[in-house]
Amino acid sequence: MRTKIAFIIAILIMLCGCGEDTIDGSLRVPQLPEEYVEFNDEINKIKNEGFELVSPNGGTNRQSVQLTDLDNDGIDEGVAFFREIGNAHKVYAYFFEQNEEGYGITAKIEGSGDTVENVTYADLMGNGNNEVIIGWSLSDSGAKSVGVYSVTEEDSVKLCEVNSLYHIACDLNGDMVNDLCVVYQDPADGKQKLAFYSQDEGNFIFRASAPLSAKSDVILRIRAAYIDDMQPAVFVEKRHGSAGVITDVITWKDKILKNLTYSDTAEESEKTARTYEMYCEDVDLDGALEIPIPGMPVNGEGEGEIIPGVSWYGVGKDYKLKAFIFRSSVEKWNVSLPLDWRNRCVAVYRKMSPSLNVSTVYSYKEDGTREELFSIMAISGENREKNMEKLGYEKLSERGNTLYAIQIKKKRYLGYDITAEMLAERFTFREAEWSTGEVVF
C-alpha cells in the first residue's frame, strides 16, 4: 500500500510539473520506478490531446490516478479520470494494463455526467475479479447515477447503470459475494427507497426494493453490518426533525427485501427515532449493531449538564433492549448499568474546578425527589493520585493525564450491590465509531 501511495504522489507531482529543490535552487523531478514511466507517458499523451485530470468528489478512493488489482493476479492495473478541457460536460475513466513495456490503455468509459462522485472496487460477480463501481453526477441538475463495469485487458462491459442518491457494495444475501444496494428516489411516488442488485448466473440484476423513512430525505450515514442473529443488513441513518436521527434496517431473507424497523402506517421507522444525533454502534461487542434511543430530556437547570441515559436496542426476530448506558460527551466514557435501572435514573455533569469534573448518577424516588447513587470523578493535574486518596475516592481507571475515581453514596439499588468492582466492570472508554463498512456523507 505504501508503494502505491508513493507512486501516485510521484505521478501527480510530475504531472503538476513540481519536484524537490536541489542545492542550486532548480527542481529535480522525483524518479519513478522504470515500470511506471510508461504509465506516466500514457497519461501525458491523454493530457496533450486536450484533457485534464479530475478527482472523485468523495469516497475512500479520491485520487485522480489510482492503482488497483482488478483481476487479482497480483499486478496492479491503473485507473485515471479525465475531463475534456474544451467540454466541461465530458468526463472519462481510463484503464491501463501493465505489460512488458509498462502500461498501455485497455479501456475507456465515458461518464454519465460531468462529475465523478466516487469510485469503488468490489467483486460483484463472484469470479474473483473486482468490478468498478463509479458514481456520476450532473452539476447543472444535480442528477446522480451509479454505473457498474467489468473491466478486462480486452475491454469494458457495463453491467448496469441506475439512478442513485447513494450506494454501498456489501454482501447482503450472505452468499460470500458482494452485492450493490442503491438509495434512489422513486419517480412514481417521490419517496426514497433502497434497491438491491446481485449476480445471477453471470448477470447482474435487480432483485427488489424496500421503502425508507419518508419524512426526511437527508441521509447522514449508510453502513453494512449485522443484526442480532448475525444476518447481514444495511443500516440507513437519516435526519429526523431538526437535529435528530432515524434508522432504517434493511435485510434480504428468504428472497424478500424488508425494512425491519419500518411502519407502513407511520411511513417511517418511528421506534428508532431520537432527538439526539447518535448513531448505531456495537456497544456490547457481540458483532451486531444496536440502535440508541436516549431518554427524555430532564430539566437540570441550575445543577449542571444532564447526561441522558441511552437505551440500546438490538434488531432481529424482535426489537429488544440490550444495554442501558450513561455516556459522557465531555470525557468520552460509558458506564453500562443494569437494564432494570432504565427510566429510573438520571446523571448530572458538573465542572467543579480546572482539575476536577464530577458526573453523578441519581435515582428517582417515589415522591419524585432524587437520591444520589454514585459519582464518577475525572481528576487531572500533577497531584491527582494524592487528591483522590485525600478525598477518599476509589480508583476506577486512568487514561492519559486523567485519573477516574468513584464515590459510592448508596450501597444497593433495585437488587444490585453498588461496588467499585461492579462499576469498574461496567466502565469503558468510547473508541472510534464506525470502524469498517460505512459510507459517511
Image (cartoon, rainbow, N blue to C red):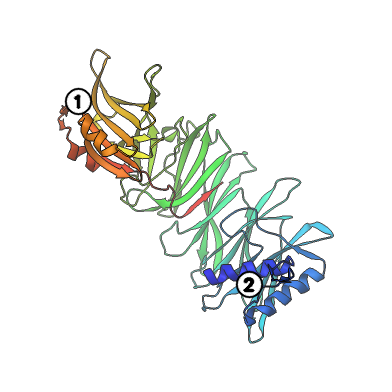
What residue do we see at 38% from left, 22% from top?
A: 304
From what the image shows, is residue 383 above or below residue 88?
A: above
Which callout, 2 or 1, points at the residue further toward the start of the chain?
2
Residue type highlighted by circle 2? Gly
CB atoms at circles 2 and 1 under 8 Å apart?
no
Is there any visible trace of residue 337 in the rendered image?
no
Near mark 1 (Cα within 10 A), the count class, few <14, some 14-19 or many ≥20, is some
Q: How far is disc 2 from disc 1 in space, using C-alphas? A: 65 Å
Name the side, left or right, on which 79 lies relative to 246: right
Q: Which mark is residue 392?
A: none
Query: Who is closer to the viewer here, 86 or 160?
Result: 86
What residue do we see at 77% from left, 59% from top?
A: 90
What residue do we see at 50% from left, 48% from top?
A: 222
Q: Residue 384: where, in percent of width, then height? A: 29, 37
Which SS class for mark 1? loop
Near mark 2 (Cα within 10 A), the count class, few <14, some 14-19 or many ≥20, is many
Residue type highlighted by circle 1? Lys
Q: Residue 322: where, in percent of width, then height? A: 29, 40
Q: Which residue is mark 1?
A: 409
From what the image shows, is residue 144 above or below residue 121?
A: above
Query: Who is closer to the viewer here, 254 or 341?
Result: 341
Q: Which residue is mark 2?
A: 78
